[in-house]
Image (cartoon, helix red, strand yellow):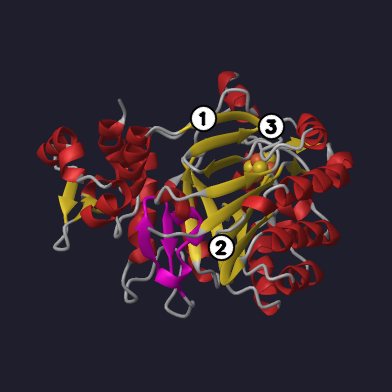
Amino acid sequence: MNKKYSIYIHIPFCRTRCFYCDFNTFAGREGLIPDYVTALCSEILRQKPYANTPVHSVYFGGGTPSRLDVSDIQRIMAALKDTFELTPDAEITFEMNPCDVTADYAAALADMGINRVSLGMQSAVPKELKRMGRRHTYEQTAAAVDVLRSAGLRNVSLDLIYGYPEQTMENWQRSVAAAMKMDVQHISLYALSVEEGSALHRQLEMGKLTLPDEDLTVAMYEYAAQTLTSKAETVPQGLSQKDQIKRFEHYEISNWAVDKAHESRHNKQYWFVLPYYGFGAGAHGWINAQRIRNEGDIARYIQMVNASDERFPAAAEIIPQEKRVEMQDVMMLGLRMLHEGITEERFRNRFGEEMKTIFRRELRHLERKNLIRWDPDNRLLLAPDKVMVANQAFIEFVD
Ligand code: SF4
């Protein structure tokens, strides 16, 4: 089993709220940033006595990490390096809003050792971006990719959303084509999920917008899955032979990478159910078979860190993880990885028991429904035509 750890750092500040967002993030609380960064560094440094495992990935997520000044990020990076041994090849990802990308900011990130950027592109269609409440344009995303590249940040990921109200297949094809034309190494596709309490939920309740029907949403996913991985001789809708078109490997249900080296190491830590720290307001961690969830409110988070000298000063909840639940997580999340899946050997090395014995009944059900397959190396994988109904497989592993 991989003995290295990962770290997630939550930056809960956004200039404005996107209409669909229900993440733990706040607009108009920037006055708290200096105290927040101080508390965050203190929470990180608290791990010093226990930090004896190398860290091979760090992920700055949010919120909008690019709301921070360079000096704030430098302080956080210094706390990380002071506390943990980051491996020389550690993947350090920084989420950015495309309109925050400037040459100076990008150069400063590269200088600090940040080597991967995740950009929230979401769409290439102006009226869709407006409908989502995004602040940037498609042109800003395209320019951001070039600026990052010039600063030496050559591992860039784009997020796109499908299934958004009023989104048409034609517009979705435009967004997929636009993403494939950019010099990026990774693409994540997110199916819209409408969360109660979001502005979008209210817009839908009031009948101002309508969701595309489910068949169209499925068709959007299938179109993208096929197009992103298609062979070089096929030219996607909206592009021509003259365009430089990138092709991708579909390595996880919602994720594509140009090659294995550009798969997200950090996300794979989650899918392999391997340990990670979560620092910041509302962050989650998984350390020593315990699930740790931090307080989500920024002011309370700061107070808790300042008031306690505990190892996990901002924990709102610490739940010991039962072995059975961990095994179920390994199965559900492992099936998300379309080539790596779950091997009996890995399962046995981790739990000292046989996957086929522990989950005999579940695996029989899944085989009967043709939801899974075994590859020649005895690796359990989701059946290739069942990616859209993967939930039917996952549910077998829920008690
Ligand atoms: S930028 Fe991201 S975190 Fe911030 S409001 Fe928009 S979707 Fe939410």
Q: CA distance from mark 1 to mark 3?
A: 17 Å
Residue 310 or residue 229, whichever sits in front: 310
Q: Report the magenta residues as a range.
A: 245-268
State the image quarter where residue 297 is shown. Answer: top right
- SS label for mark 1: strand
Residue at image x 63%, y 36%?
23
**Is the CB atom of the residue marked by disc 3 within 8 angstroms of ligand 1's nearest atom?**
no
Up-down relation of residue 326 to residue 158 (above or below) = above
Q: Of the residues under marks 2 and 3, which one precedes in the sequence?
A: 2
**Relative to 383, is 293 on the left or the right?**
right
Q: Rate crowding at label 2 as few (under 14), some (14 to 19) or many (20 or more) other CA atoms within 10 Å.
A: some
**Does any portion of residue 35 appear in the rendered image?**
yes
Q: Is residue 246 magenta?
A: yes
Q: Of the residues under marks 1 and 2, which one precedes in the sequence?
A: 2
- Amino acid at dot 2: Pro
**Does any portion of residue 215 appear in the rendered image?**
no
The tag on residue 54 is 2
Q: Position of residue 178 (x, y in %)?
A: 53, 63
- Amino acid at dot 3: Gly
Q: Is residue 251 magenta?
A: yes
Q: CA distance from mark 2 to mark 3?
A: 27 Å
**Relative to 397, is 2 on the left or the right?**
right
Q: CA distance from mark 1 to mark 2?
A: 24 Å
Question: In what quadrant does ligand 1 lie?
Answer: top right
Residue at image x 37%, y 71%?
235
**Mark 3 sits on what residue?**
296
